[in-house]
Image (spheres, helix red, strand yellow):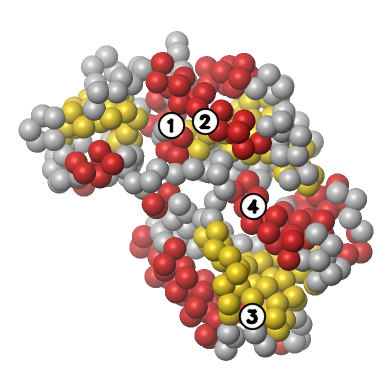
Amino acid sequence: MGLIKVVNEKPVHLVLSKDRVRSIKRGHPWIFPEVLRELPKAPPGSLALLKTVDGEILAKGYYDPGSKLAFRTFALQREKLDEQLVTARLERAAELRDVLFQPYDTTNGFRLINGEGDGLPGLVVDVYDTAAVMKLDGAGAESFYNAEELASWLMRRLPHLRTVFLKYRSGEEGRGRLLAGQAPAPDQPVRFQENGVQFQADIVQGQKTGFFLDQRDNRSFVGRLSRDKRMLNVFGYTGGFSVYAGMGGARQVTTVDVGRAALSYATANWALNGLVPEHHEAVAEDAFEFLDSAAKAREKWEVVVIDPPSFAPNKQAAEKARASYTRLFAAAAAVTAPHGFLSLASCSSHIDAPTFMEVCEDALGRARRQGYVLRVAGQPADHPFPAAAHELSYLKFITFRLEG
């Protein structure tokens, strides 16, 4: 058995009921159920041909009739969807990371495969030095890809790997399973570095694959801003921004997160880099409550980072999320010192970049603060996305300098 499984002998034929030809030919990778004439019965992960009403084959990919993403494009028109194509896409993804990070002496924690952004829909692989963590997005991807064979390919392509671990989707029983190499010890996190900064991550119990690698460039920027300053990191998780601030010379750093387990990692990551323990405070508290209390106490920080979880898991939640972001960011602006730096983030694909900028402007207005935009950023180069699918450019990160 190869890198992909064949769950159906003959491909399923899917016919468009709405005109999506231009979008598909430009490279948008998704087809939703409502734009198909019918949803034929077939197992998740079935090979499928996407066709126009006239019978023109537009794309080849895999089908999941029970998913909101009924069809994911893998190959366009005359391209052949086979082992050779999958291998070529994997190798191209690995070559890009070689360009970005070799010789892997300062950064060995990165995303090796970013799903649709590497032409491998539904497949994500993060590397943490000697450990790789795989995620398969949905039943279609789980049935289409052969996880064990992918793990074997990873071990051959990155011979320093000692572990390949499959992380299950949230809600599934257990956290994941070993695919190749040595099983990760539940009480021993993996260690890795980015830009020379040391971190450790729990790839079994931690969120996502164990760490938020997509904020690497933004952490580095915040670190440069933090010299000799008091820094506040809200929704700090395992302390990524905090450690960069400490390495950048911050005189005092506060990490706020509701999760005590995450904060224990923030403290450990601080110590891992030889930073002075007394210069870091970890606070287990709700973000809104902490910011309200800090404002009442008239506390101020010269660098403030707000990196919340997604407030909009779907389109229906977008308006409510906008109100939550506005309230949160206004509270953050209230505790930012005059001429201080305020970095605001969103990882929700349902809040686009123009909307996010409007939210930030509204929040500053509510806080009666005037701001100047220093930097507008997003995800790093190891998190690419298709040019035709701007919604996969999910990360927004804007840094302001605030007046008094």
The quarter of the displayed image where residue 51 is located:
top left
Q: At label 4, which amino acid type do we have?
A: Asp
Mark 3 Cα-neighbour bin, 10 Å: few <14, some 14–19, many ≥20? many
Residue bearing the label numbered 2: 93
Direction from residue 134 to residue 26 in the image, left or right: left
Residue occupying image coordinates x 73% and y 45%: 195
Q: Secondary structure at mark 1?
A: loop
Q: At label 3, which amino acid type do we have?
A: Leu
Mark 1 or 4, closer to the camera: 4
Q: At label 1, which amino acid type do we have?
A: Leu
Q: Are marks 1 and 4 in contact (CB under 8 Å)?
A: no
Q: Are marks 2 and 1 in contact (CB under 8 Å)?
A: yes
Look at the picture and state if 359 lies above or below 221: below
Lower position in the chain sequence, tag 2 or tag 1: 2
Camera-nearest residue between 40 and 351: 351
Residue 120 is labelled as: 1
Residue bearing the label numbered 3: 402
Residue occupying image coordinates x 48% and y 80%: 362
Q: CA distance from mark 2 to mark 1?
A: 9 Å
Mark 3 or 1, closer to the camera: 3
Mark 2 or 1, closer to the camera: 2
Lower position in the chain sequence, tag 2 or tag 4: 2
Residue bearing the label numbered 4: 217
Q: Are marks 3 and 4 in contact (CB under 8 Å)?
A: no
Lower position in the chain sequence, tag 3 or tag 4: 4
Q: CA distance from mark 3 to mark 4?
A: 22 Å
Direction from residue 388 to residue 376 in the image, left or right: right
Query: Which residue sits furthest top?
Result: 1
Measured as percent of width and height from the top left, residue 68 is found at 32, 45
Lower position in the chain sequence, tag 3 or tag 1: 1
Q: CA distance from mark 2 to mark 4?
A: 19 Å
Camera-nearest residue between 162 and 39: 162
